[in-house]
Amino acid sequence: MKNLLWLIFTFSNTLLFAQTRVDTIEVYSTSMKKNLKAAVTTPASYSKGSEKFPVLYLLHGGSGSYSDWHQKVTEKDLVPRLAEEYNLIIVTPGVGPASYYYDSPLMDSVRYETYLISELIPFVDKNYRTLAKKESRAITGLSMGGHGAVTLSAKHPELFIAAGSMSGVMNIDTRLWKVQEDFRALRVQSQKAMLGEINYDGPSFNPYTAVGLVSQMKSNGIALIIDCGVDDFLIETNRQIHQLLVENKTPHEYIERPGAHTWDYWTEALPVHLFFFSKYLERQ
């Protein structure tokens, strides 16, 4: 079916969050000709009136799922708790396993920038009571999702007031990753299939990687928070983008703390990001 589909299921919550709601929606992507799922969490106050709400788009990592932030965090019901505490809507989209939230110039099946920006966000704004404006919308994510959040906000500053990254792939150049060679080879092969031959070296880099968009980050004025564990295999990519942002005088919050590429780390990081975003999101 080429029309947008909306299939809603309600996850069961603990008694504490009995009035919050988590819908699973399915949206047809006309750009990729396939259905994609997302979870939409609304606070208790959503069902009590006509109030409109700010929205956080919360992205998963490589080989992940739209349900990861609900099922893999080490604090049960973390997303519903934060939706309730900050009185906002949280959307967790699902995308391809190694797609990095960009549009491939070579593959019609990889149009995740178009999907997020031109299909999912308008769908959520149409079907939920959102404050459908830049000043009330933020985006963040983990690993591949951190890359997506930072790059999408840099390329579409008209849509977001703030963006963040947790343990993000701030540079898709795998030479900076502390990984085994077989994993590196898989990622190089995947990137080449989606992007072809691109420039991985600075200072210009390429438009498909976060470090290649630091000039846009400087000019668009979006509030940025970037954090990474000191034992994370992506720490050097995070230090690299931090240095580039310092050099071009882009204001941003940068955090290094103990931790690795784990759900323990991301469970602790998400409340920090919500606190940061709460300083910028407008509520009317």
Image: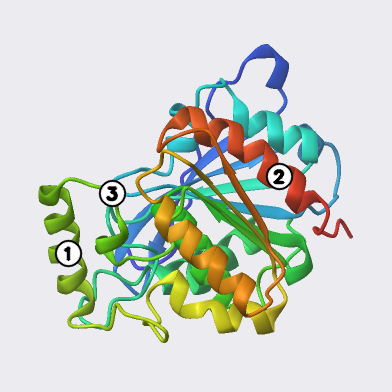
**Of the residues under marks 3 and 1, which one precedes in the sequence?**
3
Distance CA(mark 3)–CA(mark 1): 14 Å
Residue labelled with disc 1: 188
**Of the residues under marks 2 and 1, which one precedes in the sequence?**
1
Q: Do callouts 2 and 3 mark residues in contact (Cβ within 8 Å)? A: no
Kind of element beneath mark 1: helix
- Residue drawn at point x = 61 percent, y = 76 percent: 247
At label 1, counting other C-alpha atoms closer than 10 Å, the crowd grade (few under 14, some 14-19, many 20 or more) is some
Q: Do callouts 2 and 1 mark residues in contact (Cβ within 8 Å)? A: no
Badge number at residue 204: none
**Left or right: 198 in relation to 167:** left
Residue at the top extreme?
A: 15
Residue labelled with disc 2: 274
- Residue drawn at point x = 70 percent, y = 38 percent: 83
Please identify the quadrant where the C terminus is shown.
bottom right
Viewer-nearest of discs 2 and 3: 3
Q: Position of residue 42 (x, y in %)?
A: 68, 40
Question: In the picture, residue 225 is in which quadrant?
Answer: bottom right
Q: Is residue 92 above or below residue 250?
A: above
Residue labelled with disc 3: 178
- Residue drawn at point x = 77 percent, y = 41 percent: 46
Q: Position of residue 223 (x, y in %)?
A: 72, 65
Please identify the quadrant where the N terminus is shown.
bottom left
Viewer-side residue, 165 vs 235: 235
Amino acid found under the numbered disc labelled 1: Val
Kind of element beneath mark 3: loop
At label 2, counting other C-alpha atoms closer than 10 Å, the crowd grade (few under 14, some 14-19, many 20 or more) is some
Amino acid found under the numbered disc labelled 3: Lys
Distance CA(mark 2)–CA(mark 1): 33 Å
**Of the residues under marks 2 and 3, which one precedes in the sequence?**
3
Viewer-side residue, 108 vs 82: 82
